Amino acid sequence: MAEKYFPFNSVSGDREYYAEDFAAYFGDIISSGVSANGDNLGVTAAGGLALSVGTGRAWIKGHIYENTTTKTLTISAGGSLPRIDRVVTRLMVAERKIETIVVEGTPNASPEPPELMRTSVYWDICLAEVYVAASAIEVSQTDITDTRTDNDVCGVVRCAVDNLDVGAFMKASEAAFDAWLAHLKNMLDDNQAGNLQNQIDAIRNDLAGGVYSTPAIVNVRTVPGATVKMILGGIELVATADSFGLAILYPTKLGAYAATATTSNDTYVGSLDIDSIKIYNISLPGLAAMSWADIAEIGQAGAAPYVFQRGETKDVLMGSETITFRLEDFDHDDLASGGKAAMTFLMKDLLSATQRMNSSDTNVGSWNSSEMRTSRMPTYLSQLPAELRAVIKPVIKKTTAGNKQTTVQTTTDSLWLPSCVEVGLHTTEDGYKDEGTTYPLFVDNASRIKKLSNGAGAANYYWLRSPNLGNTTSFRYVTTSGTSNSYIASDSDGVCLGFCV
């Protein structure tokens, strides 16, 4: 049939319509994605390897899906390498159903989420990505990345104008205006036509300048309570960041906006080019440009996993040396005051100068009474900027007792060296495995290699706080190939400092 029309009442059974007719109809006017009303289909950690998918609705290619009660999904335990799983809501045309499922990723030292199925018979929208660390037996909320507002993999249900070619639409509209106005001028006197022309020109200027009735959506991640503004010419949009550091603004004009985020501590300036009608996700500012006071405030609000990402870095002037610290994890280390530290940072590379663990070749007394801890750490701490020292939180660190003992001591530390297991080494050996838990970014030998002079120098050995369990003279260190070895405590090796905020 060359022409189709839909819908009309049936007379004696001469009009029959199929599910694909309705799906095609709705698919032309409603985009695929989750409903914009409320927290639809949010994915949260439910303990162990369980995930909870909240209630809510979604549209997929003109088909509607609704989850009326919380759904529990279970992911597989971590293997020898990390992976990234997806939680997707999948349209299955042949099976005539839509279902929310887990699609397991491929383990890899640098894992990527699995491809979405998007064919004529299957179509996925991704609700969340779940990072599964090597050997993981549980996932936390910090391992879950909400992707519902990402248009590339999901998006929020909107009118199909979201898919409109704005340029082509504007050209067609202008041509229609011209034809209509030419016809109308023939019917009006000069004054009436002139007045109408002025009004139409004003509308045209708006349209040509990118002003539309349908807004873009800008999700800004920043400090909770911050005032966020977007300014373009005489247009000023304002929103306040919620308790998770999210401020949402709705620009209706395309163009390059000046953006600011004002907190109780600082004002940050950025820019954002709104070049189409879609959802934008930005941070203002990123970790690198944010003050330590605001970073700490985000941590205290419990918003750090929503504003930052593991692996982000921030430079710190330490004495006369600029050192890059990397955000290793969220809610990982135990605070001395109780609860979890919001964020843990480690040096991305090493200090320029090497240091010894002890003046003599002994590991008796372990990390607790080592020269590195009792003498060097206070010196390093004094070299950090005052604004950073003000927000560092003392944490509990576990280390074997030295002198060939596998019993574990605890210390309270503001600055510290990582242990074997914290960098992913000796994770199953008695003693070593009890010195904390692995930070997720340490996934293989390459991820453990560090260079002197903040990366400008050569790869170098660097100390771990773990005593060698096989003798009374050595501490463990990371080699230039990212493996583990040990050497006498008086040797001079690289230094990689950690702290928590």
Image (cartoon, grey):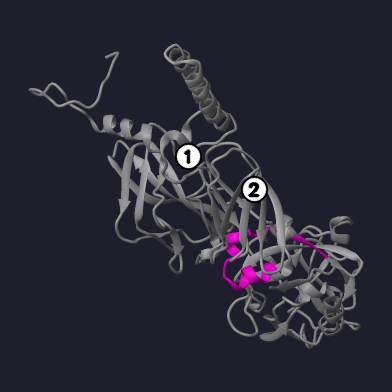
Residue corresponding to mark 2: 231
- Disc 1 to disc 2: CB gap under 8 Å: no
Residue 117 located within the stretch drawn in magenta: no
Question: Which kind of residue does numbered mark 1 sit on?
Answer: Thr
* Residue 432: quarter of image: bottom right
Q: Which of marks 1 and 2 is in front?
A: 2
Residue 310 drawn at (x, y percent): 65, 60
Position of the C terminus by quadrant: bottom right
Q: Position of residue 181 (x, y in %)?
A: 47, 17
Depicted 249 relative to depicted 489: above or below: above
Give me the disc on residue 214.
1
Viewer-side residue, 447 vs 374: 374
308 is higher (above) or lower (below) than 214:
below
- The answer to which image quadrant residue 390 occupies is bottom right
Q: In which quarter of the image is the N terminus?
A: top left
Q: Amino acid type of disc 2?
A: Ile
Picture coordinates of residue 242 (x, y %)? 53, 63
Is residue 133 visible in the rendered structure shown here?
A: no
Label 2's element? strand
306 with respect to 357 (left or right): left
Point out the stretch of residues depicted in magenta: 294-316
- 149 displayed left or right of 16: right
Disc 1 to disc 2, C-alpha distance: 18 Å
Secondary structure under tag 1 reads loop
* Mark 2 Cα-neighbour bin, 10 Å: few <14, some 14–19, many ≥20: some
Disc 1 or 2, which lies upstream in sequence?
1
**Is residue 364 visible from the viewing direction of this image?**
yes
Quick check: 189 left or right of 237? left
Q: In this view, does 221 lie above or below 332?
A: above
* Residue plotted at (75% across, 62% down): 483
**Residue drawn 72% across and 76% down?**
392
